[in-house]
Image (tube, rainbow, N blue to C red):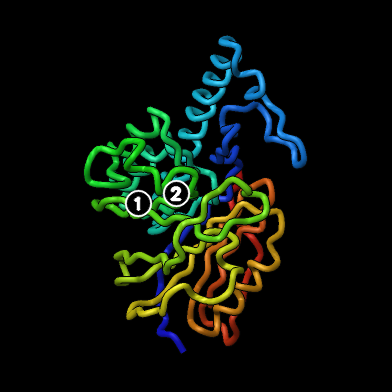
Amino acid sequence: MAKPFLCKVGIAQISANPAYADELVSTIQEPVFPGKTEKVGLFSIAGLEEVNALRQRISEQYISHLNRKLEAFIRFGAARGVELLVFPEYSVPPESLPTCRSLCNELGVAIIAGTHVVTVNPVALQIYESIQLFPEKSPDVAALDRQVRQAVCVVFLPGQKPVTFAKYVRSKWESCLIPGRPALHSFEMATKAGQIEVQVLICIEALAGGTPTKEKHSHPRLIAIPAFTPTCEDFHNFGKLNLPQGKCTLFANVAEFGGSRAFARAENANLWLTQADVLLST
């Protein structure tokens, strides 16, 4: 039986246009999410100068709105003593990373900033360099060749450089995504109760089975799953299966699909239990 460990964590089940880009379209530049069978959107006529300018304005207004939303969630959690806050998969684009880093350092809250697909547009490159996300040297197209079109999860820890994990299992909806190298994605963080280790499984990675590398850890273990999925049952089952091993699981899904949940042992209870969602969605 694992030793009891108390740590305040938060799950931000937010509504967000996915920070996903393929060879044709970046969804944060479109007024609607692309269709399932046919890709339609303003990108199809982006050769027109006026249309391309409109796409840029859509992106700028969306990012401005999203940054205010992210700040509200982070400050809300920090005011209630949250030490680790998890955002869903594809909910935090590159343009919002500086906001997360700044609030992480200001408020002392560790943030798992969802995921985004790496691009080499000038704005993204400038941000990657400013927050030291990739190599020590100034990033350029050549230096980022291995990361472009990968989905990366960025973790911010107070007073530290960001930690980045690349998604290594591609779902059927991510046909243009380039998988990263399989690895045990984890980081350690200090809490008021002591040191813990957090393992990050990006959505479908939690259901892929097996562990890419042998696990070696000496601290209490927490599993965080940033997700963007319409089906949650398998992830809930995964969380339940990890309880007898003394591992708590945080499943953070986007608000359109819901089902975000924390799996942990209820205090003073004889059984391992889960409770219904009590979450703030927006």
Relative to residue 80, is residue 257 drawn left or right? right
Kindly identify the residue that appears in the image at 35 percent across and 34 percent down: 125
Residue at label 1?
Answer: 156
Which residue in the rendered view is the most extreme toward the bottom?
A: 1
> Image quarter for residue 229?
bottom right
Which residue in the rendered view is the most extreme toward the right?
A: 37
The answer to whether the residue labelled 1 contacts the one labelled 2, judged by CB atoms less than 8 Å apart, is: yes
Q: Is residue 181 above or below residue 41?
A: below
Q: Residue 100: percent from the left, percent from the top?
A: 38, 43
> Image quarter for residue 270?
bottom right
Quarter of the figure with the C terminus: top right
Q: Residue 177: percent from the left, percent from the top?
A: 56, 48
At label 2, the amino acid type is Ala
Residue at label 2?
Answer: 113
Q: Residue 203: percent from the left, percent from the top?
A: 57, 59
> Image quarter for residue 112?
bottom left
Q: Residue 185: percent from the left, percent from the top?
A: 41, 65
Kindly identify the residue that appears in the image at 44 percent across and 43 percent down: 148
Relative to residue 184, is residue 37 drawn left or right? right
Instruction: State the residue in front, 264 or 89.
Output: 89
Q: Is residue 49 above or below residue 103?
A: above
Q: In 3D space, how far apart are the residues under numbered discs 1 and 2 (Cα atoms)?
A: 7 Å
Mark 1: give few (<14), some (14-19) or many (20+) Cα within 10 Å. many
Instruction: State the residue in front, 182 or 216.
Output: 182
Kindly identify the residue that appears in the image at 53 percent across and 18 percent down: 57
Mark 2: give few (<14), some (14-19) or many (20+) Cα within 10 Å. many
Kindly identify the residue that appears in the image at 36 percent across and 43 percent down: 144
Give whichever of discs 1 and 2 has the lower sequence position.
2
Secondary structure found at label 1: strand
